[in-house]
Amino acid sequence: MNNNLDGWLSPLNASLKYLELSEQYLLDDEQFKNFKSNPEYFNTFDVSYSDSQIYKTMIDDDYQITSDQYIRFMENDLVGNPKVYSYGDYTFSPPTVRYIKDSFFIKKNIQDVKIKKILEVGAGYGGLCKTLDVIIDFEEYVFVDLDPIIKLQEKYLKCFECLNDKNFKFISTSENNSIENIDLFISNYSLSECNFDIQMKYFDLYISNSKYVNIIYNYYTGDFDKFVDKLKTDFDVNVTNDFNNKLIFAKRK
């Protein structure tokens, strides 16, 4: 398997444990049933309940969400047995609340543009994909990640019948083939936790072939301005703040 962590800036021990647990959940269906209950794994997604309450307030203030959409969003927590909390009339895990907020942020920026192909670098277990499906009728979703992670994403998404009509593609980070005609490139946290050389690799392979770009940048090095300047060459770029993160949304010029 491709467990090569060269270029990652996140703590090595935590990254290795994340990969180890992902491989366990691939092999053991009983452990997979409760994988979101394991703090060693799920803390990788690092959304506290207090932060999720702020996200929920942001959702309520900025977006109109139907009860049917909320019910479909709750499906993300039916697999993996995460800890859930009440948010008004609905219950979610804190990461799912963030996925809802992220999904509507994307939808607000693309408006009514048809999005057929989405590519996400570093998609965790696939939760954003499941959440985005509620409000964006995409046809193809491409995942780029380390081998055990993309296999876990595939296993997770197969749990949802509502995704049976979607075309999923899973690409190892060891591959260096470009992907053409990407409508929306996404990387929430993962790209900013790589060094600049790896960021430019993904820029050349994927971002340069995308119409829209959505990045949550949470690892501040001197490379943030360099990355944004590179993006501005071909895109109109908007940068906003979210907690301690930078939200980058870009549209091809």
Image (cartoon, rainbow, N blue to C red):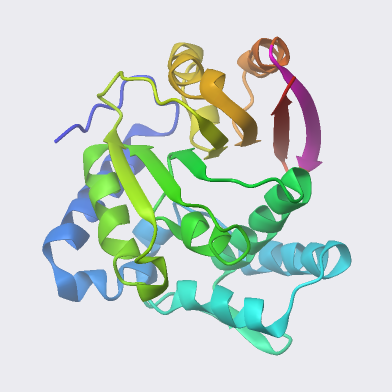
Q: Tell me where residue 97 appears, x and y as whole percent.
A: 63, 66
Q: Tell me where residue 181 appears, x and y as whole percent.
A: 50, 29
Q: Residue at x 50, y 42 (%)?
A: 118
Q: Main secondary structure of the magenta part?
A: strand
Q: Residue at x 44, y 32 (%)?
A: 10
Image quadrant where one finds the N terminus = top left
Image quadrant assignment for residue 217: top right
In the image, which residues are magenta? 234-241
Q: Is residue 236 left or right of residue 125?
A: right
- Please tell me whether residue 35 is drawn above or below residue 194 in the rendered image: below
Image quadrant assignment for residue 36: bottom left
Instruction: Return the residue nearer the eye: 75 or 81.
Output: 75
Q: Tell me where residue 27 appears, x and y as whole percent.
A: 11, 61
Q: Is residue 58 magenta?
A: no
Q: Please give the count of numbered marks on the rendered protein.
A: 0
Can I make out residue 217 in this image? no
- Please tell me whether residue 16 is drawn above or below residue 74 in the rendered image: above
List the single residue furthest toward the right.
61
Image quadrant where one finds the C terminus = top right
Q: Is residue 154 left or right of residue 113?
A: left
Q: Is residue 240 magenta?
A: yes
Q: Residue at x 45, y 57 (%)?
A: 43
Q: Is residue 176 left or right of residue 249?
A: left
